[in-house]
């Protein structure tokens, strides 16, 4: 099966491993990720003001491209996924917003053929694993199970919220990452702060705030016995790495190890 | 701000946020769950009640609009579906669209960089702090 893939700016730079492992694991699991040509940065955050148009056009272009390929749109970065999914939701539910967006992306007289109305299916890579491939098939494909490892899933906010739009999981009691951890043979550690914010982009101008948030999360995970944490977000990884002692790794790297694509 | 201007700006904030402050029952859950609570001068529930009262000038001038992490915890956990973060975002949008009101400038960025900082942090900060 082929899917359209939106890597995003950080997966092409600081988080290259996240990109490489995502592609090579998908290949082994029978999915070809076709990178969208000339994709543009999603901007990292979705502005919830409904009259904000220009900053959402790059997401709409990616969504529209995937629709023309007849493929679902996949991203790995939590922030890209959040922006793509929220933009798609706005295109589906806010007719005035959709109309204004389509004025920007269609040629005069071509609206019927070129307009985008929110029909693309948007998946986070974890949802690809759960809903398209299936965790059972992943369990069967595992060559080197991570037996005995106690892993804390760090969700953060962007994958889960706003939950009425993201619809990935129960935002207060999620299990998709824990099920992933079980599928690769390790043991998930449940801790209360797994879905609380790491301090996000505020780290740029108020690092003390991000430090406070990240430290509390790391302490909570450590107290519950996690050997290390997994994340899907480069910004979460940055904030957590900077402020604690437990290693934080991209979930795709663990998948690659379990599938025998890379050595531990 | 002129009285008229205030009234129109309140309408604009309500329209672009889609938030109806009248639904709020003042339970304080949004502020109780807010990870930026300690850093805020005005807290999420106060944003809601102050917009409802038309008391927006202090909010437009407050650094609190730049402390919100957009974590959407208040949006998910409000028992009335008020979605306070959308109101805060609308006020931040209105503020930054004013002349000379960008909270961060591209020239400020080099001094804030370190080796590990992901591009995502920079683009997000620019979207949140600039028009
Ligand atoms: S979205 Fe902003 S106001 Fe709401 S809980 Fe998060 S940091 Fe606080
Ligand atoms: S949680 Fe909702 S109802 Fe309660 S104070 Fe905040 S906005 Fe009002």
Image: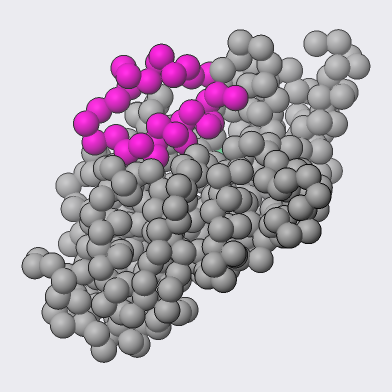
Left or right of residue B79, residue A243 in this image: left
Quarter occupied by residue B85 = top right
Which residue is at the far right? B4
**Rendered-image quadrant of the C terminus of chain B:** top right
Residue at the image position 38 percent from the left and 28 percent from the top: A204
Residue at the image position 64 percent from the left and 16 percent from the top: B61
**Between residues A5 and B34, which one lies in front from this camera angle?**
A5
Total marks placed:
0
In what quadrant does ligand 1 lie? Answer: top right
Residue A231, x across and y down, in percent: 32, 57
Numbered range of the magenta stretch: B103-131
Q: Is residue A31 magenta?
A: no
**Between residues A47 and A211, which one lies in front from this camera angle?**
A47
Left or right of residue A211, residue B61 in this image: right
Residue A206, x across and y down, in percent: 39, 26
- The correct choice, above or below, for A251 with respect to B86 in the image is below
Asked if residue B33 can be seen in this view, the reply is: no
Residue at the image position 36 percent from the left and 51 percent from the top: A233
- The correct choice, above or below, for B41 with respect to A105 in the image is above
Residue A30, x across and y down, in percent: 33, 80
- The correct choice, above or below, for A96 with respect to A144 in the image is above
Residue A91, x across and y down, in percent: 70, 55
Left or right of residue A76, residue B91 in this image: right
**Rendered-image quadrant of the N terminus of chain B:** top right
Residue at the image position 75 percent from the left and 43 percent from the top: A103
**Between residues B50 and A202, which one lies in front from this camera angle?**
A202
Q: How is the image coloured?
A: one colour
Q: Is residue B114 magenta?
A: yes
Quarter occupied by residue A167 = bottom right
Asked if residue A38 can be seen in this view, the reply is: yes
Left or right of residue A168, residue B96 in this image: right
Which residue is at the far left? A263
């Amino acid at each position: 099966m082929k899917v359209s893939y939106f890597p995003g700016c950080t997966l092409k730079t600081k988080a290259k491993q996240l990109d490489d492992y995502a592609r090579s694991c998908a290949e082994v699991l029978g999915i070809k990720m076709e990178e969208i040509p000339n994709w543009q940065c999603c901007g990292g955050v979705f502005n919830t003001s409904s009259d904000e148009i220009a900053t959402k056009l790059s997401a709409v272009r990616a969504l529209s491209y995937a629709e023309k390929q007849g493929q679902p749109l996949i991203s790995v970065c939590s922030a890209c996924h959040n922006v793509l999914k929220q933009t798609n939701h706005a295109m589906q539910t806010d007719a005035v917003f959709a109309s204004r967006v389509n004025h920007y992306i269609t040629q005069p007289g071509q609206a019927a053929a070129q307009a985008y109305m929110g029909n693309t299916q948007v998946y986070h890579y974890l949802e690809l694993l759960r809903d398209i491939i299936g965790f059972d098939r992943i369990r069967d494909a595992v060559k080197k199970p991570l037996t005995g490892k106690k892993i804390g899933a760090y969700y953060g906010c962007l994958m889960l919220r706003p939950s009425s739009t993201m619809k990935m999981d129960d935002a207060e009691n999620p299990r998709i990452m824990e099920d992933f951890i079980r599928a690769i043979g390790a043991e998930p550690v449940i801790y209360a702060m797994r879905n609380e914010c790491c301090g996000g982009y505020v780290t740029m101008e108020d690092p003390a705030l991000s430090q406070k948030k990240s430290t509390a999360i790391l302490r909570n995970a450590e107290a519950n016995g996690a050997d290390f944490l997994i994340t899907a977000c480069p910004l979460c990884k940055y904030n957590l790495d900077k402020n604690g002692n437990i290693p934080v790794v991209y979930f795709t790297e663990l998948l690659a190890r379990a599938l025998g694509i890379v050595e531990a | 701000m002129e009285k008229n201007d205030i009234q129109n700006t309140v309408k604009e904030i309500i329209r672009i946020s889609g938030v109806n402050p009248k639904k709020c029952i003042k339970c304080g859950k949004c502020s109780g769950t807010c990870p930026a609570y300690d850093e805020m001068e005005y807290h999420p529930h106060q944003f809601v009640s102050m917009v409802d009262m038309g008391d927006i000038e202090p909010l437009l001038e407050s650094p609190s609009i730049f402390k919100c992490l957009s974590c959407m915890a208040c949006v998910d956990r409000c028992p009335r579906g008020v979605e306070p973060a959308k109101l805060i975002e609308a006020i931040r949008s209105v503020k930054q669209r004013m002349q000379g009101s960008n909270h961060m400038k591209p020239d400020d960025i080099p001094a804030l960089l370190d080796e590990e900082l992901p591009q995502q942090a920079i683009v997000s900060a620019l979207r949140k702090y600039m028009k």
